[in-house]
Amino acid sequence: MQTCKVALLLAFVLWSSSLRGYAQPHVADNDPGDAGLSADVEVYSPDASSLPDSLGSESTSAILIAANASNPTEPPKSEDQAPVSDEVGSVKTVKGSVSIVSGGQTISAAVGTRLHVADVLKTEKDGSVGVILKDDTVISLGPSSELEMKDFKFEPKEEEYSFVTRMVRGTFVYVSGLIGKLSPESVKMETPVGIIAVRGTKLLIRIKG
């Protein structure tokens, strides 16, 4: 099993009035890794000025700015990208070197680039990226980060929901959207040592390898 320390900076500040009354995030000590995360949980306000210096203020500021992005511009059409049926959202902000591994091909991320199930987002040391999903979930990555969109389903009429990511390394901001509101148990974030079951909150998550 990969050895790493996962520091979860859980911010209990409401993203909007529609998120009031939600339960706190739950960290499940089950697969992958079968290792509990409770010893690595710390709570901070999602404000770069209130976070410990160890996070790196510049990196944290970059992803918090990306996390506060508004609705994205209309993503451009591309024949090289996967069908719209597996589309989960699009890129809103990009800074520095950011790539997307999609369908076995690696492309450079740009504002408006579509994201699909199984896509992997990667940022280099100078990179950060903010994305917004079809249910208005916001995910932002800081420098030297990697995240896979493992599963996404948002079908309110059928009441079918799923949002699963695999966080490999780096720093992330998560702001819940409608899936987190309508079906919080459907939101799960896999890390190298366990699964974070989100309950409609705003999270700042750091994985140290």
Image (tube, rainbow, N blue to C red):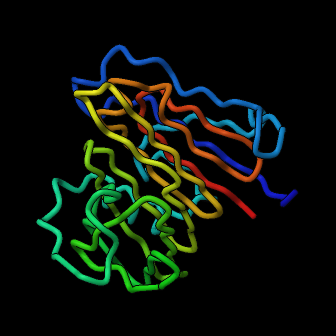
In the rendered structure, the answer to whether residue 67 lies left or right of residue 123 reads: left
Q: What residue is drawn where x is 71% and y is 49%?
A: 6
Instruction: Provide residue 11's location: percent of width, then percent of height.
Output: 47, 35
Instruction: Provide residue 193's location: percent of width, then percent of height.
Output: 77, 47
Q: What residue is drawn where x is 23% and y is 24%?
A: 18
Q: Can you say which quadrant of the picture contains the C terminus?
A: bottom right
- Hey, which residue is sitting farthest left in the picture? 74
Relative to 31, say whether 62 is above or below.
Answer: below
Q: What residue is drawn where x is 62% and y is 43%?
A: 8
Q: What residue is drawn where x is 47% and y is 17%?
A: 23
Instruction: Provide residue 78's location: percent of width, then percent of height.
Output: 22, 81
Instruction: Provide residue 101's location: percent of width, then percent of height.
Output: 49, 77
Marker count (numbered): 0
In the rendered structure, the answer to whether residue 115 lies left or right of residue 76 reads: right
- Residue 188's quadrant in the figure? top right
Relative to 16, say whether 169 is above or below.
Answer: below
Q: Can you say which quadrant of the picture contains the N terminus?
A: bottom right
